[in-house]
Amino acid sequence: METTHRVFVGDSRDLAAIDDDSVELVVTSPPYPMIEMWDELFTALDPAIGDALESGDGRAAFDAMHAQLDRVWAELERVLVDGGIACLNVGDATRTIDGSFRVYPNHARVLEAFESRGFDPLPDVLWRKPANSAAKFMGSGMIPPNAYVTLEHEYVLLFRKGGESRGFEPGADRRYEAAYFWEERNRWFTDVWTDVQGELQALDGGDGEADLRDRSAAYPLEIPYRLICMYSAYGDTVLDPFWGTGTTTLAAMCAGRNSLGSELEAAFVERFDDRVPDVPALSRSVGRARLERHREFVASRREDGKGFEYEADYYDTPVVTKMERGIRLREVEAIESIDADTDDGNSGDGDEYGYRAEHAPLGLGEDGR
Ligand SMILES: C[S@@+](CC[C@H](N)C(=O)[O-])C[C@H]1O[C@@H](n2cnc3c(N)ncnc32)[C@H](O)[C@@H]1O
């Protein structure tokens, strides 16, 4: 099986290089309005935003920043297939402007924007980040009433385009082979995620990437990987219009899906080539970690005196439900750059990057299990 991955250096307010109805899943995290690190970027998109911030009009700046994101949401509506899903990781912002502290509720504003475009909101996920220390309450004091709650969660907002779920050809292998384990379902489809930080972190690259990840506010690989497994099948195409360091593309490669990305900052995109040689090993360890975790689950369920009715078709392991029998994870066997520049009018020479990945079914570990 082969997948392709294309990244455009450009502005996602105009995704002309991407055809209508050609994307099954969007997984992304926009720059969060009213978080200071993005002020400059938003001001470059619309200078009125800088003026509003300077004059102390937080409300106007917030609205104007979301007006820029709205233009990207319009493009997502165009390129997503009917029944396609959009997953948006977004956090609210707290900020003092002109002496007045308040929260800017990005999640509510994005939800409203998608709903008004006719997307159906689906139950969302609250991503609870691990509390760091008591220092987070610094400055709040112990005297009522003027202390504020510390925000330690973000959202994964979920929307479906059109009123109906996607259809598949009957018995579609690409869907059944993309099944997830019963216990993964139980963890992934819960509405509060407390288990994300750290899970695949060790696989997220070395020290050299830390600075890049900070500058781009990259999310952990686990977030897009999990969402891709939850909401797409093999052969689908996943788009990230706020591509950053390309975490979504890495996750799509590991998960055996095609991907598209668009990113304003050429420097982020150029750095991706350095990560590509690690993709085969990364994909193997992500897949093996899932199988290993499943074996741990099997052992603990047996210890609890519970049995299994089914055997997986491709792995030497029992599974809880009939639907999991066809699970077949993929690994990247080989990956190469392809010349992705096209005469599509959107991107000139050198501002489009492409990769082709060759996938094989994930084998058993070296110990033969
Ligand atoms: C929160 S970061 C995404 C980080 C990404 N999820 C990762 O893991 O690396 C948002 C990204 O969107 C990019 N961006 C903002 N506005 C954009 C636009 N209109 N078109 C394309 N990219 C944009 C920023 O440059 C930034 O890299």
Image (cartoon, rainbow, N blue to C red):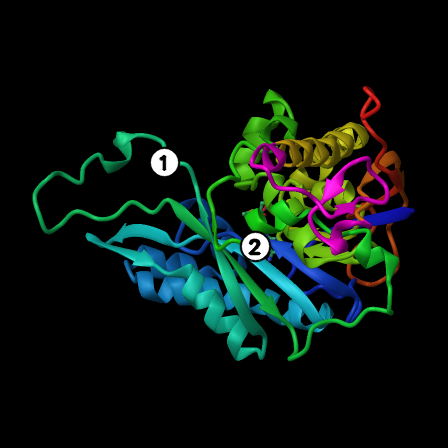
Residue 73 lies within the magenta run: no
Per the image, label 2 sits on a secondary structure element best described as loop
The image quadrant of residue 18 is bottom right
Q: Would you name the residue on which mark 1 appears?
A: 131
Residue 325 lies within the magenta run: yes
Per the image, label 1 sits on a secondary structure element best described as loop
Instruction: Give above or below for 203 relative to 250.
Output: above
Residue 13, position as x, y percentages in the image: 63, 64
User: Could you say which is closer to the camera, residue 2 or residue 113?
Assistant: 2
User: Could you say which is closer to the camera, residue 202 or residue 314?
Assistant: 314
Q: Would you name the residue on which mark 2 appears?
A: 189
Contact, mark 2 vs mark 1 (Cβ under 8 Å): no
Residue at 70% of width from left, 43% of height from top?
251
Q: Is residue 241 visible?
A: no
Instruction: Give above or below for 137 relative to 71.
Output: above
The image quadrant of residue 254 is top right
Residue at 59% of width from left, 75% of height from top?
119
User: Could you say which is closer to the camera, residue 226 or residue 261?
Assistant: 226
In the image, is 100 to the left or to the right of 1? left
Q: Residue furthest left?
A: 143
Residues packed near mark 2 inside 10 Å, few (<14), some (14 to 19) or many (20 plus)? some
Which quadrant, please, contains the C terminus? top right
Q: Which comes sooner in the sequence, label 2 or label 1?
A: 1
